[in-house]
Image (cartoon, rainbow, N blue to C red):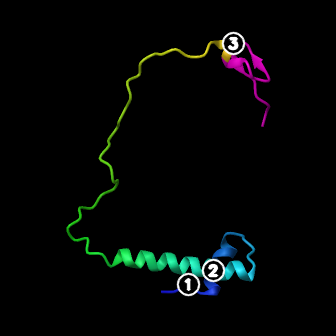
Amino acid sequence: MAISRDEVLHVARLARLELTEDEVERFREQLNAILEAVGKVAELDLSDVQPTAHPLELVNVWADDAPRPSLTVEEAFANAPDRDGALFRVPAG
């Protein structure tokens, strides 16, 4: 299944993009190359491969919550343009 010029223009319209004719042709070629690569993957025999949701078997990996040295209050506020006591003051909306 090849991507046509009209399909590239349709996707560009959906994304609110203006493309030159050179860009349309370049993206058409790139998208067709991507589809060809995906097609090669689809041809692989994966019947012996277990379905996976994630390639790594890491579940709820947490680091120890141990206190360690940190900034003092004055160091934390050293570059703050404004503060209110122990709080950073930021401009409204």
- Examine the image and state in which quarter residue 6 appears: bottom right
Tell me the crowding category of disc 3: few under 14, some 14 to 19, or many 20 or more residues within 10 angstroms, Cα based. few
Q: Kindly identify which residue carries mark 1.
A: 3
The mark nearer the N terminus, 3 or 1, is: 1
Q: Amino acid at mark 3?
A: Glu
Of the pair 13 and 24, the residue shown nearer to us: 24
Query: Relative to 53, is 82 on the left or the right?
Result: right
Whether 55 is drawn above or below 68: the answer is: below
* Tags 3 and 1 touching, CB below 8 Å: no
Q: Amino acid at mark 1?
A: Ile
- The prevailing secondary structure element of the residues shown in magenta is loop
Query: Relative to 22, is 68 on the left or the right?
Result: left
Tell me the crowding category of disc 1: few under 14, some 14 to 19, or many 20 or more residues within 10 angstroms, Cα based. some
Q: CA distance from mark 1 to mark 2?
A: 7 Å
Q: Secondary structure at mark 2?
A: helix
Q: Amino acid at mark 2?
A: Val
Q: Kindly identify which residue carries mark 2.
A: 8
Q: Kindly identify which residue carries mark 3.
A: 74
Q: CA distance from mark 3 to mark 1?
A: 59 Å
Tell me the crowding category of disc 2: few under 14, some 14 to 19, or many 20 or more residues within 10 angstroms, Cα based. some
The mark nearer the N terminus, 2 or 3, is: 2
- Examine the image and state in which quarter residue 49 appears: bottom left
Of the pair 2 and 40, the residue shown nearer to us: 40
Residue at 73% over, 76% down: 19
Of the pair 84 and 75, the residue shown nearer to us: 75
Position of residue 57 measured from the top left corner of the image (x, y, whole percent): 29, 47
